[in-house]
Image (cartoon, grey):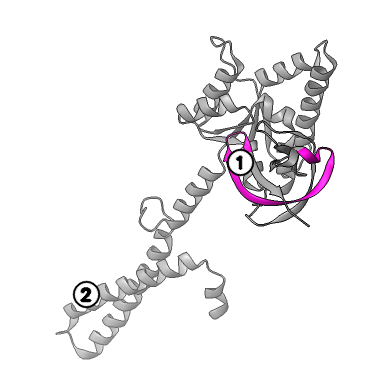
Amino acid sequence: MADTIGDKPPLQIIGGSVGLLVGLIVAFFVSNIFSNVYSALNVLLSVITYTFFGTLGLIVGSRMAYSPEFPHFNIKSKIHEKNNLLAKAKVLDTSAIIDGRIVEIAKTGFIEGELIVPSFVLKELRHIADSADDLTRAKGRRGLDYINELKEMDYVSLTITDKDFKDVDEVDVKLLHLAMELKGAVITTDYNLNKVAILQRIPVLNVNDLSNAVKPNALPGESFLLEILKEGKEADQGVGYLHDGTMVVVDQGKNYLSQERLVEVTSSLQTPAGRMIFAKIKEE
């Protein structure tokens, strides 16, 4: 008995228990009808009544927990709907594909839902891959390679759709139309597309925002070695970069160009383009 109950989902056990209780209450009132009946028969009818309504309540209560006709019991359905919201389709734009970080993110398993690559994005990638400029051509071919890599991942669902919008010329506008039609999100690294998507209330996942979010915070007073590579915009400033690409502006760093110095963080600033750290030369 205990093993049988233990195998049931908690929601079904709760629903069955509530149903059983309701059934027994109903049986109590029904059995009062037989109170004036001959005692032996009264006992028999009461046993039958309690057994019938108790069993009926148990069965109905268990089923109600999962039935869409009873949304106040349908906790599982609500959880499922929430998961579907989190796992909505995600439309990849050209910039995110060429950038390539989406492949590494996919490898970690953080991406849920279906990845959509529109045929018009593929067409744009092929056009870039056929460019006369060596650098541009390399970017296009790399983007096509990234798509193939995503397709080969067993734990990534990638679909190439032929859906097009013939009356629209711009690829970015087509992309937004597709995302709206699918009720999905856009994955991009394009700052302007990001802004337009937000204005149109289309969910957007910017790979740059994710990259900035996972960078470790540099706290005031923290020290580290930094190679000062160039002059800053202000007088006597020097500029260097962390391994993750974060810019570090060093006060009085101009005097130490092309040198590795110990610097101390004074403050940091989050901008749309990324995070900047301000530091000063730490006296050894």
Residue 258 is one of the magenta-drawn residues? yes
Q: Which residue is mark 2?
A: 30
Number of residue marks: 2
x%, y% of residue 206?
60, 35
In front: 69, or 58? Answer: 69
Q: Residues within 10 Å of mark 1 (few under 14, many from 20)?
A: some
Look at the image and give the residue range highlighted in magenta.
Answer: 255-274
At x 84%, y 42%, the residue is 259
Amino acid beneath label 1:
Gly
Q: Residue at x 65, y 33 (%)?
A: 234
Q: Which residue is mark 1?
A: 113
Q: Is residue 21 visible?
A: yes
Q: Decide which of 270, 197 is in the foreground and name it.
A: 270
Q: Position of residue 35 (x, y in %)?
A: 17, 84
Q: Secondary structure at mark 2?
A: helix
Q: Can you say whether 197 is above or below 88 in the image?
A: above
Say whether residue 145 is magenta: no
Whichever of labels 1 and 2 marks the residue nearer the N terminus, that label is 2
Q: Nearer the viewer, residue 233 or 158?
A: 233
What residue is at 46 percent from the left and 65 percent from the top? 11
Residue 114 visible here? no
In the image, residue 271 above or below residue 2? above
Is 6 left or right of 159, judged from the image as shown? left
Quadrant in the rendering for residue 193 = top right
Residue 239 location (% of width, % of height): 73, 37
Instruction: Using the rendered view, name the quadrant where residue 61 is placed.
Output: bottom left
Q: What amino acid is at disc 2?
A: Val
